[in-house]
Image: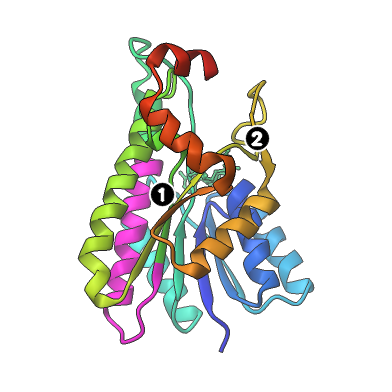
């Protein structure tokens, strides 16, 4: 029986690349996002290239009541999920004092509440049955340090980091694995208009690294590990003036 993965944010970037990588490895897929047409065309392409079952589920993570039913449907239709990846996210750049409350709420809604609710629903499913599963949260280097003009984004990723840390302790006895992956710069629509993206790698390369780290069941890792493990450490200790110049 092939294993099954649900990926949020599968219509673009890292989520789409993860879907291709898992399809290549013979997994069944539940592709989740708002842009249904993009998911349908990805599903058609993956099915045509011989993927196991591919399920398309339209979901807006701001509609929190719809999250658990979406995961339940995937669990039913794919005969049991093994892995849930809370990947969907938005990054918007603005400074304190600009009154960007709507954008704040959207980012917190998708990156924090939406990701936590996805993980909550996955844990509920995994707790119900004998063979436990794995949940993965995609954070960011911004979880290590608040970055200028990315204060709310940094806050959502730091918050998700803490939630994953707590969930890992809560679920260890039940055999549920909790993995946090913190990407550096990955070439996706999220950051294509940023003029400087040091050490940027393709989404395909990032997805391959991520799948290997997930398979190994690591608790947390930077992606790619080099140079971002070191950068994560440096980000915590660099003086603000230097960090500001680098970012
Ligand atoms: N790219 C990087 O360098 C980088 C670095 C660090 C962390 N990350 C993190 O990696 C994750 C993926 O980012 P990416 O670079 O692949 O970005 P992306 O190409 O912009 O993709 C973002 C995905 O999130 C989904 N999404 C956004 N709002 C949503 C909503 N309200 N409901 C459901 N889905 C929603 C989008 O789907 P729809 O629009 O179709 O709904 C899309 O599939 C994010 O959590 C991001 O913070 C990325």
The reply to whether dot 2 and dot 1 touch (C-beta < 8 Å) is no
Q: Position of residue 244 (x, y in %)?
A: 46, 15
Task: Measure the alpha-carbon separation of dots 2 and 1.
Answer: 30 Å
Q: Secondary structure at mark 2?
A: loop
Occupied quadrant, residue 199: top right
Foreground of the two, 14 or 179: 179
Query: At 68% from the left edge and 42% from the top edge, which residue is drawn?
Result: 201
Residue 111 within the segment the image draws in magenta: yes
Q: What secondary structure characterizes most of the magenta part?
A: helix
Q: Which residue is mark 1?
A: 61
242 left or right, relative to 54: left
| Mark 1 sits near ligand 1, with its Cβ under 8 Å away | yes
Q: Which residue is mark 2?
A: 199
Foreground of the two, 53 or 247: 247
Q: Point out the image quarter for the N terminus.
A: bottom right
Q: Residues within 10 Å of mark 1 (few under 14, many from 20)?
A: many
227 left or right, relative to 145: right
Is residue 90 at all visible to an observer of this figure? no
Occupied quadrant, residue 193: top right
């Amino acid at each position: 029986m092939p294993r099954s993965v649900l990926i949020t944010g599968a219509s673009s970037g890292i989520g789409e690349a993860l879907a291709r990588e898992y399809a290549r490895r013979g997994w069944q897929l539940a592709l989740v996002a708002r842009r249904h047409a993009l998911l349908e065309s990805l599903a058609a392409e993956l099915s045509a290239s011989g993927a196991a079952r591919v399920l398309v589920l339209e979901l807006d993570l701001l509609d929190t009541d719809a999250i658990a039913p979406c995961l339940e449907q995937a669990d039913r239709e794919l005969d049991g999920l093994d892995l849930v990846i809370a990947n969907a996210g938005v990054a918007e750049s603005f400074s304190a004092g600009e009154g960007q409350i709507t954008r704040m709420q959207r980012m917190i809604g998708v990156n924090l509440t939406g990701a936590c609710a996805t993980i909550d629903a996955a844990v509920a499913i995994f707790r119900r049955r004998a063979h436990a599963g794995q949940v993965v949260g995609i954070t960011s280097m911004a979880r290590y340090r608040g970055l200028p003009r990315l204060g709310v984004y940094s806050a959502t990723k730091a918050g998700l980091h803490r939630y994953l840390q707590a969930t890992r302790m809560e679920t260890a006895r039940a055999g549920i694995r909790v993995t946090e992956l913190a990407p550096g710069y990955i070439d996706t629509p999220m950051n294509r208009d940023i003029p400087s993206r040091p050490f940027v790698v393709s989404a395909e390369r990032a997805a391959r690294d991520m799948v290997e780290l997930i398979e190994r069941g690591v608790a947390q890792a930077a992606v790619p590990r080099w140079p971002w493990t070191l950068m994560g450490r440096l980000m915590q200790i660099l003086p603000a003036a230097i960090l500001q110049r680098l970012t």
